[in-house]
């Protein structure tokens, strides 16, 4: 099957239904960002340290797979030259809505996060990449493409899923309240789920996910040429999963191109 197209349609559906990551920020948030009062997240709760950005005014910034009318408009209002690049046309539509409503100079391009061929080498100073590479089978391509399009001294700010999340069957956790390891890593909905559950995800237009190992997530950035210069963990703000009570389920990294 065409994973890219399935996930595009699934995220279009989620966006129309008001998914948390698809609710555009309000006018006051943009107004404050224009004054220098802003924050953005790579993961559900913790704000990204301002030091990870430096002075973003007039910097060329790629928001990678982070459409939804949230991060890209805020960063544009804060003074960056922002391009939002996302697989979902509906998510990009939310970015445009906020940009047009608040007179922001924000460009949107639809495409695959693993294929940045539309951009020249060394095109950006910063890449902002929230948790989204769970939707691509091979994350190494994403890291290599990010390295290529960044300028020397530029940084990739990325949020990734703790691979421990994918060890468990979360439907079973909801039913039984028990944490029992079921799947091996790396994880793929395509190979780990039985046919009936997989087909239900496909028919219900739920995005298909892939759980990458730490070696693929962090080691992959280093292998691509990056130097890790920042790191923190995060969780959900509630008990969205039982696992959240025992360990942070998200990781954020700042990786710099030497």
Image (spheres, helix red, strand yellow):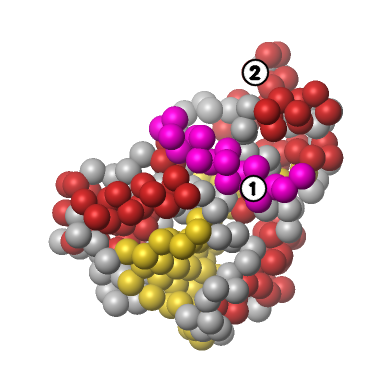
Residues at circles 2 and 1 in contact by the CB criterion of under 8 Å: no
Q: Earlier in the sequence, mark 2 or mark 1?
A: 1
- The C terminus lies in quadrant: bottom right
- The N terminus lies in quadrant: top right
Give the residue furthest to the top.
176
Residue denoted by label 2:
174
Report the residue at 31% width, 70% height from top: 80
Is residue 56 depicted above or below 151 in this figure? above
Q: Position of residue 171 (x, y in %)?
A: 69, 22
Is residue 58 depicted above or below 162 in this figure? below
Using residue 152 as the reference point, say whether residue 209 is left or right of it. right
Q: Is residue 66 visible?
A: yes
Mark 2 and mark 1: Cα distance apart in space: 29 Å
Is residue 192 depicted above or below 228 in this figure? above
Magenta residue span? 1-18
Residue denoted by label 1:
5
Other residues around mark 1 within 10 Å, as few (<14) / some (14–19) / many (≥20): few
Q: Position of residue 251 (x, y in %)?
A: 56, 52
């Amino acid at each position: 099957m065409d994973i890219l197209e399935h996930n595009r349609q699934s995220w279009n559906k989620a966006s129309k239904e008001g998914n948390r990551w698809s609710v555009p920020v309000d006018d006051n948030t943009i107004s404050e960002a224009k004054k220098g009062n802003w924050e953005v997240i790579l993961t559900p709760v913790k704000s990204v340290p301002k030091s990870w950005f430096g002075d973003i005014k007039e910097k060329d910034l790629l928001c990678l797979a982070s459409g939804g009318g949230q991060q890209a408009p805020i960063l544009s209002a804060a003074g960056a030259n922002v391009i939002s690049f996302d697989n979902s046309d509906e998510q990009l539509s939310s970015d445009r809505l906020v940009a047009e409503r608040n007179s922001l100079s924000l460009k949107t391009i639809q495409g695959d996060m693993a294929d940045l061929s539309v951009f020249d080498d060394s095109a950006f100073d910063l890449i902002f990449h929230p948790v989204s590479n769970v939707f691509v089978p091979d994350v190494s391509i994403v890291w290599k493409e990010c390295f290529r399009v960044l300028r020397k001294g530029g940084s990739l700010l990325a949020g990734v899923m703790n691979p421990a999340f994918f060890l468990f069957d979360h439907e079973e956790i909801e039913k039984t309240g028990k944490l029992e390891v079921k799947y091996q890593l790396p994880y793929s909905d395509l190979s780990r789920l039985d046919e009936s559950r997989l087909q239900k995800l496909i028919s219900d237009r739920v995005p298909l996910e892939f759980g990458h190992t730490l070696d693929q997530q962090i080691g992959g950035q280093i292998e691509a040429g990056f130097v890790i210069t920042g790191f923190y963990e995060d969780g959900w703000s509630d008990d969205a999963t039982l696992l959240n009570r025992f360990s942070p389920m998200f990781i954020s990294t700042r990786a710099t191109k030497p």
